[in-house]
Amino acid sequence: MKSIAPDEFQYLIRKTVTYLEFHNDDSAKEIAAQWRHILAQIHQIEQQQRQPKRRS
């Protein structure tokens, strides 16, 4: 199985969220919200990794 790059993974999540937004059932809304939360967490981790590390 081929591994995917982080950018490709995030693209797949965004594509899935877009697809789910076209469905009005509660399950689709819940899954889309969970994926949005995961994307936000990924973004936060990326921001933390970009910041220079401070030495104590």
Image (cartoon, helix red, strand yellow):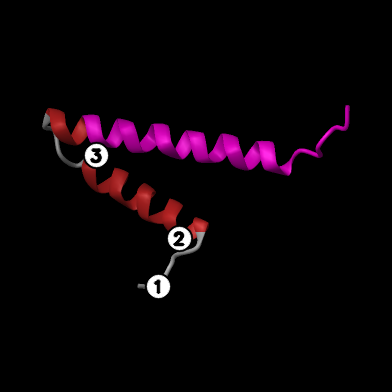
Q: Earlier in the sequence, mark 3 or mark 1?
A: 1
At x 51%, y 57%, the residue is: 7
Q: Magenta segment, principal secondary structure?
A: helix
Which quadrant does the C terminus fall into?
A: top right
Q: Is residue 1 above or below residue 43?
A: below
Identify the element where label 2 is drawn: helix
At x 42%, y 37%, the residue is: 38
Confirm whether the magenta stretch covers residue 21: no
At x 40%, y 31%, the residue is: 37
Give the labeled residue for mark 2.
8
Identify the element where label 1 is drawn: loop
* Quarter location, residue 45: top right
Give the labeled residue for mark 3.
21
Say what amino acid the circle numbered 1 marks: Lys
Q: How crowded is mark 3: few (under 14 residues within 10 Å), some or many (20 or more)?
A: some
Disc ID at residue 2: 1
Q: Where is residue 40 in the image (x, y as percent from the top left)?
A: 48, 34
Question: How much space separates mark 2 and mark 1, taking CA atoms?
Answer: 12 Å
* Quarter location, residue 11: bottom left
**Residue that protrudes farthest toward the right in the picture:** 56
Say what amino acid the circle numbered 2 marks: Glu
Confirm whether the magenta stretch covers residue 37: yes
**Residue that protrudes farthest toward the bottom in the picture:** 1
> Is 11 left or right of 16, judged from the image as shown?
right
At x 40%, y 72%, the residue is: 2
Question: How much space separates mark 3 and mark 1, taking CA atoms?
Answer: 28 Å
Q: Earlier in the sequence, mark 3 or mark 2?
A: 2
Label 3 close to label 2 by CB (< 8 Å): no
Q: Position of residue 30 (x, y in %)?
A: 23, 29
Which quadrant does the N terminus fall into?
A: bottom left
> Is 5 left or right of 27, judged from the image as shown?
right
Question: How much space separates mark 3 and mark 2, taking CA atoms?
Answer: 20 Å
